Amino acid sequence: MRTVKRLSEYLFLWAFGGTLYYTFEMVFRGFSHWSMFLLGGVCFVFFAQQGLWTGWEEPLWKQVGWCVIFVTAGEFITGIIVNKMMGWQVWDYTDQPFQLMGQICLPFTVIFSGLCAIGVLMSGYLLHYLYGEKKPCFHVL
C-alpha cells in the first residue's frame, strides 16, 4: 500500500508542477510547449523529494540552492534535446548575458531561484496536508 501512496504522490506532484510551470509560461511568455510541462513536473517532484530525503530540516537557502542547480541542469539537458537535437526552438537565450549555448543563462537562473523557493514551500505543505507526510519546518539559517 505504501508503494501505491508514493506513486500517487509522485504523479500528483508531477502533474501539479507541470501545470504550474506551463501556466506560468503562458501568463508571462504568451506560449509554452509540452516539454515544459514535463520538465516542470519533474522539477516539482525533485523539490518535494529533496525535502523528504532531508526530513525538511535543512535551511531553506540550501534546499533552494539544490533545486536551482537541479532546475538549471534540467533546463540545459532539455534544451539540448528539444532545441539542439530535435530542432524545435522552444527557447533561445543567446541574446541574454552569461548564457551557455543559448540553453541556460544567469538572469533566468535568478528568476528560477524564486520559483524554486515557492516550489519547495508548496511541495512540502502539499505532501503534508494531502498525504500526511511529515510537516515541513522551514527555517532560513
Image (spheres, rainbow, N blue to C red):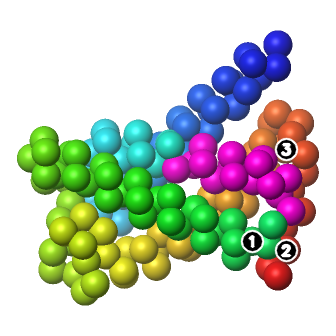
**Is most of the magenta stretch helix, strand or loop?**
helix
Among the 4 quarters of the image, the one containing residue 1? top right
Q: Earlier in the sequence, mark 1 or mark 3?
A: 1
Task: Please name the residue shown 60% across and 71% down the image.
Answer: 65
Q: Distance between the residues labelled 2 and 1?
A: 6 Å
Task: Please name the residue shown 31% across and 42% down the image.
Answer: 35
Q: How far apart are marks 1 and 3 (CA)?
A: 17 Å
Residue 128 in picture, x, y percent from top left = 85, 44
| Label pair 2/1, CB-CB below 8 angstroms | yes
Q: Mark 1 points at which residue?
A: 60
Farthest bottom residue? 97
Instruction: Give the number of the mark in front: 1 or 3.
Output: 1
Badge 1 element = helix
Q: Which of marks 2 and 1 is nearer the N terminus?
A: 1
Among the 4 quarters of the image, the one containing residue 121? bottom right
Range drawn in magenta: 43-57
Residue 27 in picture, x, y percent from top left = 37, 60
The numbered mark at residue 2 is none
- Give 15 or 68, whichever is nearer the viewer: 68
Among the 4 quarters of the image, the one containing residue 7? top right
| Label pair 1/3, CB-CB below 8 angstroms | no
Please give left or right for residue 86 compared with residue 132 in the image: left
